[in-house]
Image (cartoon, rainbow, N blue to C red):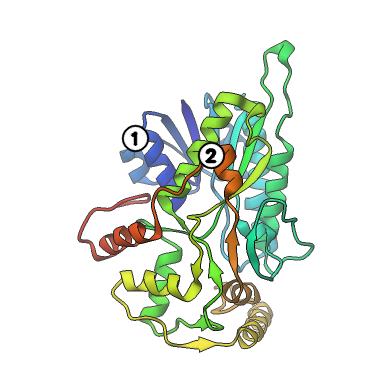
Amino acid sequence: MKVLVTGGGGFLGGAIVRRLIARGDEVVTLQRGDYAWLREAGAAVVAGDIADFDTARRAAEGCDVVFHVAAKAGVWGALAEYRRINVIGTDSVMRAARDAGVTRVVYTSSPSVTFSGHDERGVNESTPYPHHYLTHYPATKAEAERHVLNANGLDGDERDGVAPMATVSLRPHLIWGPGDNHLVPRIVDRARRGKLKIVGDGANLVDSTYIDNAVDAHLLAADQLMEYGADAACAGKAYFITNGEPVPIRELIDRIIGAAGLPPVRKHVSPGVAYAAGAVLEAVYRLFGIKSEPLMTRFVARQLSTAHWYDISAAKRDLGYEPRVSIDAGMIELREWLSGDRDVYRGGPR
């Protein structure tokens, strides 16, 4: 099939692109940058803003399915920019898809859309969106997710031979692995500079997702939509995606930095102190208009000190999803990639 991947220059988007091309699909990517490695991999590249309808429409032309991965991530920045990319950009991609006759959309969301600042222990997709968010990223991702799921079943007219829209939203948690240009580098960099601290005792359980497993979930969802359309078991629904191996957060952090040859984290800070520090830093950064992300925010303090693990039985049932790469196996590949001993590659430039 012919596929559009937004955010193809990123970690997850790039890994999806590589997998699609490897299995013989024709791939078009849309992202702000014009990445040479995408062309070298065999993708047709459209460089532009997803919020620009004409650009998104051009990229969607002739495609069968859209993987909408592009987003403004992070925990700091102006609400207007988060809305422009995460909400307006998503609406632009959806409109472009419909206008181009593309009726299958797989949206990459985030488990943070349900995060209220408290423990999430084994929660499933019945967990409601909270009334208040601590930062703009999950708020705008939740709004966009609702728009995508509400589009499921729309615009269908069997008399005119037009299939209804079929959409699904995936919520992978803490994606990591070879090629990671966000989570792993941040943790390793802070550890090397002696700035990494565990918030609380680090015993809170967290889920994570190895990159190959995250890609598997996306392709499984797309294949379901392609075969069954709006009648697919997954159509119009959101799914938590993880490795299904919750571990204490201190263990996950220590194993990631250990893969980089660094010793375990010994420094701790209490959740209350971290939250207070985040509130102060946020206020100072706003007062002086500082654009860079504070070392700590209220959202990060709560994320690091609470439990985040999810029931993925719905994804297993409806998508046929099974995490095939364990944390143990993934850490071996991460160590080899970080050390440069082997060309273990998942996405992004080599």
Element carrying mark 2: strand
Mark 1 or mark 2: whose residue is earlier in sequence: 1
- The foreground one among 86 and 291 is 86
Element carrying mark 1: helix
Kindly give the residue lying farthest to the right in the view shown: 131
**Residue at image coords 60%, 25%:** 228
The location of residue 265, given as percent across then percent down, is: 41, 82
Total label count?
2
**Residue at image coords 40%, 85%:** 194
Asked whether residue 227 is in view, the answer is yes
Q: In the image, 285: left or right of 19? A: right
The location of residue 302, given as percent across then percent down, is: 63, 75
Q: Amino acid at mark 2?
A: Phe
Asked whether residue 170 is in view, the answer is no
Residue to which mark 2 is pinned: 67
Q: Is disc 1 surrounded by few (<14), some (14 to 19) or many (20+) residues within 10 Å?
A: few
In the rendered image, the vertical position of residue 75 relative to residue 223, given as above or below: below
In the rendered image, the vertical position of residue 78 relative to residue 311, given as above or below: below
Mark 1 touching mark 2, by CB under 8 A? no
Number of the label disc, if any, that sits on residue 22: 1
Residue 127: quadrant of the picture? bottom right
